[in-house]
Image (tube, coloured by chain):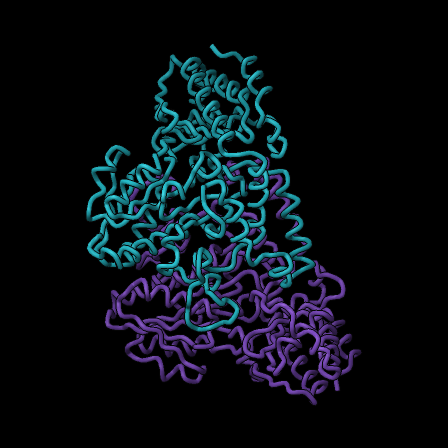
Chain colours: A cyan, B purple
C-alpha cells in the first residue's frame, strides 16, 4: 500500500515540481482536468494586460506591425513545433481545432482526388471526438462526390478497415474518453502502405506525450492549445502539414491571411508557400498572445521528462484507486500498457456523473464523459503525487459513503 | 472657412462627447483608424483581468458553466442584434469574418441548389474586400460544381449583372476603400426579384451606420466586431441568418458547438435549431468576453445619434480638406451624397502611402489602401470635431512642406 508519506517523498525528489510555481492554481482544489482546460500560467495575466493596455490601447492599429501581431500564428507555431516533432515554419497556431480539421481534410481529399480519385472512403473511429466526425460529415455533405465515413469500433479493427478504397484516415492520437494512445508511426506506415493519407488529431497529445510527426512520417496534424499546453480558455488551435504535401494544394478556407501577397489586396486568391497558406482570417489577438506563456514553461523542460512523470502519476492513480476503492464498481477503461496510454485515466462507474459532481464539491476536479466515464487528467507540469493520493482518498470516501447520491441532479455538461 | 473655435463649439454641444471618456486613447494621437481597429474601451482591461484571474485561474473548467462561457457567442449576438436590425436569437459572435462568410455562402448555395440548381453564378464587386472574394473562390473550387464568380467594377453595374443565372449576390455594405454605401433594402429587393439570395458583409457598417437587416429583408449577414464595435484586436466576427432560411440547411463547418445536443457526444451531426447551428468550435474566450465592453458603450446611445454625428464629422473633414489642401493633388473617392457614404472618407494622392506615413509620424493615424488611397475613419463615439480640424491642418502642412518625401521608404502594410 503506497502511503501519503511515500507520495510526499516522490514530490520531494521530483525535478519538475518547481514548475508548479509558474501556475496560478486556486487553494483547496486538486485539479485533474488539465486535459480539458489547462491551468493558468501566472505570466498570462501580465501578458494579456500588456496586449490590452499597451499594444491595443496605446499602439492601436500600429501594433499589427510593431507588436508583431501579424505573424504571431507563425511565431507561436515555431515555438510549439519542437513539442510535436515538427520543423521550423511548419506549424501555425490559428482558428479552432474543428476549423483546422476542415482545412487539412479538405486539402487531403484534394491531394487524393488528383492521385487516386476512386478512393472515396474516410476511415475514423466511432469513439473519435465527435467534432472530428461532424466536420468530416459536413465536408462530405458539401462535396457531394460520393464520399463516405467508415467508422471502426476499436483500434484493433483499423487495420482491416484500411483498404484500397480509403482516401484518408483521420485518427485522434490519444482517445478523449479512454486515454488509449495509438502507435502513430506504425499506423501511419500501414496507412501509407495502403495508399491513404494520415491526419492526426493531437488534442490530447500535444504537451502530454512525446509526439514526433516527422519521424512518424505523418501527413497532417491538428491540435489544441487550451488543454495540456495551458494557452487559456478556447485558445487557438494548431495545424501542421508535411512539407511534402503542403504546397501541392490550397486548403479550402482561403482567407486573406493565407494569401501570398496579403496586402496587395488582389481580387484573385493565390496561396502562400508553406504553412502560412493554412491561415485564414484575423485572429483574436489577446487570447492568441497568451498561448506563448504556456509554451514558455514547456521550454524549461522536455517531453521525455514530462512523459516519465506522467506515467508515474497515472500508474500511481490506477494503483491507488484499485487498492482504496476495490470494493466499488469501478472499471478501468484506460490501457495499463504504457505504450498505449496518454496522460489521462478513465474509470467507468454506474453513477459516474454523480460521483464526479461529488468529487468537484469536495475540490477534486475531474470530468465526466458519456457514458458513465469519470475522466482524470494528469499534467506533470503542475500535478503532484500527493494530490493523486489525496484525490483517491476523497474518491474512496465518496464511494464508501455514497455521497454521490445527493449530487446526481446537478447541471450536467462541461466543455472538453 | 470653418475655424478651430467653431469646432470647439461643435464639441461643446455634442451630446455624444462624454462617451469618449469610456475609451483609453493615448495622448498625442488623433485616431482616425477606428474603422480598422477600434479604440480600447477602458472597461476591457478589467473585464479581461476577471476572465483570466478569476474565471480561468480560479474557476478553471467550471467556468464553462458558472461564468457563462458556453453561450457567450449567443449572448453577445443578442446584444449586438439591435445595432443591425436583427431579432433575438438571430446573431452569434464567433470565429472570423472569413470563416463566417464560408458558412453563410455554403448555406446559401445549398438553399439555391434545392430551389434552382441551374443557378451557378455568384455576383460580387471587384472592389469588394479581398478575403470575401477569396473565400468565395475557395468554396467554388471545393464544390467543383460549375460555379463562377461574376465581378462588377462599379455599384451601378450590379443591376445589369444580376440575372437568372445568379444564385447569390455577395456585397459589402460599405466599401472598405471608398466608403461607398449601398442601399441595402433596394438592392436586396432587386436581388430577390431575380430569384437570388443576398449576403451582406457589414464589416464597415456595424456600429458605423444604421443597418436594418429585417426591414431590408436580407438573407444572410456577417461582420466584424474589432472595427467600429471596439471589441479588441481580431475579436470574433458575427453571423446573422434570416429566420426564414436558418433551419432549411446545415452550414458546412459543422462543429460540435452547432450540434443540437452538444454534450451527448453522438457520432452523427445534427444541427441545432436557429442561429446556434452557425457555431463550430471552441472560442478564444478572453478575446470574446471583451466584445461586451464595446457593446456596453453602444447601449448608452443609438445608431441615429451616431449617424448624425458621423455625417457631421465626415462632412467637416471633406470640407476642411478641400479648403485647406486645395492646392494639392487630392481626389475625393468617397461619395458626397449622405445616403451613399459610410463612416470613413478616402482621398487618393499620388504619394498616398508616404503621406499616410508622414501623418502617422505626426500623430494622426489614418491608413493606406492600394492603390494610392488615404483612408480616414470617423468614429462618433470618440472622434471630436476639433480632432478633425487639427488632423486637416497637419495634413495641409505635410502636403505644403512635402515632408512625406522622407516617409516613403518605411515599412508598408497594416491590417484593415
Q: Is residue B194 above or below residue B269?
A: below
The one nearer the camera, A276 or A373, is A276
Q: Position of residue A177 (x, y in %)?
A: 37, 33
Q: Is residue B74 visible?
A: no
Looking at the image, residue A79 sits to the left or right of residue B14; the answer is left
Query: What residue is at 44 percent from the left and 73 percent from the top?
Result: A267
Q: Quadrant of residue B384?
A: bottom right
Looking at the image, residue A265 sits to the left or right of residue B413; the answer is left
Q: Is residue B208 above or below residue B329?
A: above
Q: Quadrant of residue B274?
A: bottom left
Q: Quadrant of the C terminus of chain A?
A: top left
Q: Is residue A56 above or below residue A332?
A: below
Q: Is residue B263 visible?
A: yes
Q: Furthest residue to the right?
A: B5
The one nearer the camera, B384 or A78, is A78
The one nearer the camera, B208 or A114, is A114
The one nearer the camera, B247 or A187, is A187
Q: Position of residue A45 (x, y in %)?
A: 64, 43
Q: Quadrant of residue B265?
A: top left
Query: What residue is at 57 percent from the left and 69 percent from the top?
Result: B208
Query: What residue is at 38 percent from the left and 83 percent from the top?
Result: B159
Q: Position of residue B327 (x, y in %)?
A: 70, 89
Q: Furthest residue to the top?
A: A1
Query: What residue is at 23 percent from the left and 45 percent from the top?
Result: A194
Q: Position of residue B125 (x, y in %)?
A: 43, 77
Amino acid at each position: 500500500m503506497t502511503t501519503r508519506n511515500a507520495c510526499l517523498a516522490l514530490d520531494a525528489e521530483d525535478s519538475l515540481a518547481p514548475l508548479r510555481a509558474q501556475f496560478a492554481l486556486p487553494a483547496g482544489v486538486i485539479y485533474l482536468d488539465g486535459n480539458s482546460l489547462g491551468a493558468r500560467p501566472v505570466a498570462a495575466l501580465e501578458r494579456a494586460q500588456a496586449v490590452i493596455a499597451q499594444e491595443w490601447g496605446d499602439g492601436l492599429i500600429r501594433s499589427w506591425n510593431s507588436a508583431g501581431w501579424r505573424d504571431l500564428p507563425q511565431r507561436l507555431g515555431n515555438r510549439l513545433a519542437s513539442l510535436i516533432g515538427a520543423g521550423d515554419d511548419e506549424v501555425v497556431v490559428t482558428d479552432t481545432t474543428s476549423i483546422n480539421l476542415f482545412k487539412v481534410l479538405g486539402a487531403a481529399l484534394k491531394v487524393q482526388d488528383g492521385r487516386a480519385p476512386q478512393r472515396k472512403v474516410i476511415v475514423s473511429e466511432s469513439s473519435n471526438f465527435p467534432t472530428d466526425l461532424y466536420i468530416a460529415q459536413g465536408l462530405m455533405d458539401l462535396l457531394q462526390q460520393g464520399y463516405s465515413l467508415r467508422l471502426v469500433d476499436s483500434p484493433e479493427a483499423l487495420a482491416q478497415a484500411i483498404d484500397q478504397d480509403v482516401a484518408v484516415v483521420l485518427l485522434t492520437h490519444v482517445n478523449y474518453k479512454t486515454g488509449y494512445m495509438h502507435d502513430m508511426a506504425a499506423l501511419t506506415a500501414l496507412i501509407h502502405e495502403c495508399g491513404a493519407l494520415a491526419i492526426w488529431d493531437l488534442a490530447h497529445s500535444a504537451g502530454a506525450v512525446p509526439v514526433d510527426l516527422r519521424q512518424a512520417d505523418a501527413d497532417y496534424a491538428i491540435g489544441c492549445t487550451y488543454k495540456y499546453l495551458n494557452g487559456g480558455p478556447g485558445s487557438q488551435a494548431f495545424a501542421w502539414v508535411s512539407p511534402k504535401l503542403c504546397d501541392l494544394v490550397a486548403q479550402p478556407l482561403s482567407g486573406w491571411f493565407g494569401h501570398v501577397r496579403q496586402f496587395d489586396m488582389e481580387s484573385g486568391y493565390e496561396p502562400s508557400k508553406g504553412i502560412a497558406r493554412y491561415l485564414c482570417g484575423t485572429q483574436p489577438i489577446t487570447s492568441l498572445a497568451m498561448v506563448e506563456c504556456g509554451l514558455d514553461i514547456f521550454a524549461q523542460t522536455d517531453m521525455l521528462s514530462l512523459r516519465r512523470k506522467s506515467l508515474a502519476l497515472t500508474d500511481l492513480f490506477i494503483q491507488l484507486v484499485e487498492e482504496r476503492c476495490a470494493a466499488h464498481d469501478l472499471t478501468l477503461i484506460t490501457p495499463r500498457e504504457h505504450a498505449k496510454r496518454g496522460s489521462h485515466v478513465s474509470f467507468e462507474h454506474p453513477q459516474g456523473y454523480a460521483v464526479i459532481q461529488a468529487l468537484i464539491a469536495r475540490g477534486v476536479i475531474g470530468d465526466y464523459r458519456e457514458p458513465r466515464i469519470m475522466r482524470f487528467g494528469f499534467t506533470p507540469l503542475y500535478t503532484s503525487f500527493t494530490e493523486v493520493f489525496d484525490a483517491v482518498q476523497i474518491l474512496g470516501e465518496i464511494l464508501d459513503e455514497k455521497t454521490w447520491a445527493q449530487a446526481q441532479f446537478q447541471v450536467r455538461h462541461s466543455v472538453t
